[in-house]
Amino acid sequence: MKYDIHTLKNGLRVVLVAMPQTPTATVVVMTGTGSRYENEKENGLAHFLEHMFFKGTKKRKSARVISEELDAVGSIYNAFTAKDRTAYYAKVSGRYVDTALDVISDIFLNSTLPQKEITKERGAIIQEIDMYEDMPIHTIDNVFDALIYGKTHPLGRTILGPKENIRAFNRKEFAGYLKRNYTPLNTIVCISGSFSSEKVLVKITKNFGRLPHGNPPDYITFSSEQSSSRVSIKEKKTDQTQLMLGVTAFPYLHKDEYALSVLSTILGGGMSSRLFMEVREKRGLAYSVHASVDKYPDTGSFIVQAGVEHGKLEKAVETILAEFRKIKRVKVSATELKKAKSYMKGTMTLALETSDSVAQHAASSLITLGRVRPLEEVIKGIDAVTTEDVQRVAREILKTEKLNLAIIGPHLHKEKLNPLLRV
């Protein structure tokens, strides 16, 4: 797959990915900012601003006008805010790519941020916070991040922010954040699928070339100083206990990033992984259990998440830690290593099958790595991992003093769990 990259005079990068075999096209505008770039008083502002972009522009006066125009062409459109990036996108039939590009460009460049809409949207965001509070499977990561990164570090705060902040934000703060964080050097425009490259590049250059120069925002780096295992419990009446058990790990471009990904896959990737077989199939402790890796430029984490019966929390934690100890002690077999690699390569290939996934991948790669990492490079990195690499990485990160256990459920006594955290 060819990634055609252009840099405008103001530093904004454009990625065009022709996929003539697909009938769709996706427009993504992504900027390298999110909740990590907020101070405590601003926490929640990046996400709130994302909502406000859909509330009207000079050309499209209201949210209804924007949504009706995209609905009229059968578009799938939305936006998201993460800790280190924010994106706006629309996927359409290739024949409507001009409409998608026009609307997404307009909301990104020309949103009016009307105060009356800010006032109204406060209620919607507070309801969004309440909705996720009723879904512990989607908020356990907030408890884990606060534990592993600390509540005073931006990475340890939630993306949605606290309700008191949401109620207090004003238009001046939105405008200031926008000017500081949405800069050309920090922004990627990507179109993938079926479209005319020459035609869309002219439009993008005309629209985005007017953005004034500005440096990308800075962030507070993180360095783990953890010296003992930790437990955090959010006591809540639930039907199921949600847990995350993990450690700090590697940042982007670390020499062992592929070995860590293979380790994560062996432990908790897919329905034949070690944790799925031990926790669910053999013991029936959880419906869902999986492992994942999270990465930033300066840090990262390896995490196992599961939802378990309240009375089986301790047994589930013991079972997960037993698998940690096993993979540190005994090298994985050549057969298991091959299976994990094949699983990873297969799922990655499937994930890059559609225009929207290709656009998200290209934009995210440029934001986080400074270049688009092709699938072939990733596959080569995976293939190079050895059984010795997996064991070495397991021994490096899976240490007793680095363990973090986050819990949401009707539990009160941390002291019962701390003695279990041994690897």
Image (tube, grey):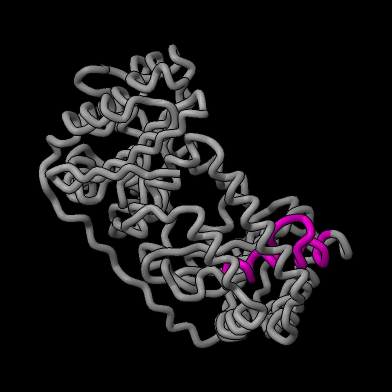
Image coords of residue 264 (percent x, y): 63, 67
Above or below: residue 109 compared with residue 213: above
Magenta highlight range = 260-280
Residue drawn at the location 60% of the way across and 62% of the way down: 292
Image coords of residue 391 (percent x, y): 65, 82
- Residue 154: quarter of image: bottom left
> In the image, 206: left or right of 190?
left
Image coords of residue 184 (percent x, y): 19, 46
Tag count:
0
Q: Quadrant of the C terminus?
A: bottom right
Q: Is residue 278 magenta?
A: yes
Q: In the orientation shown, which residue stands out farthest toward the top?
A: 72
Magenta stretch: helix, strand or loop mostly: helix
Q: Is residue 344 magenta?
A: no
Above or below: residue 37 compared with residue 14: below
Image coords of residue 13 (percent x, y): 25, 45
Which sits in the foreground, 73 or 94? 94
Above or below: residue 117 compared with residue 72: below
Which sits in the foreground, 56 or 152? 56
Residue drawn at the location 29% of the way across and 45% of the way down: 5
Residue drawn at the location 59% of the way across and 73% of the way down: 385
Which sits in the foreground, 171 or 252? 252
Residue drawn at the location 48% of the way across and 83% of the way down: 226
The answer to whether residue 55 is visible is no
The answer to whether residue 382 is visible is yes
Which sits in the foreground, 69 or 256? 256
> In the image, 279: left or right of 94?
right
> In the image, 66: left or right of 91?
left
- Residue 53: quarter of image: top left
Above or below: residue 95 compared with residue 343: above
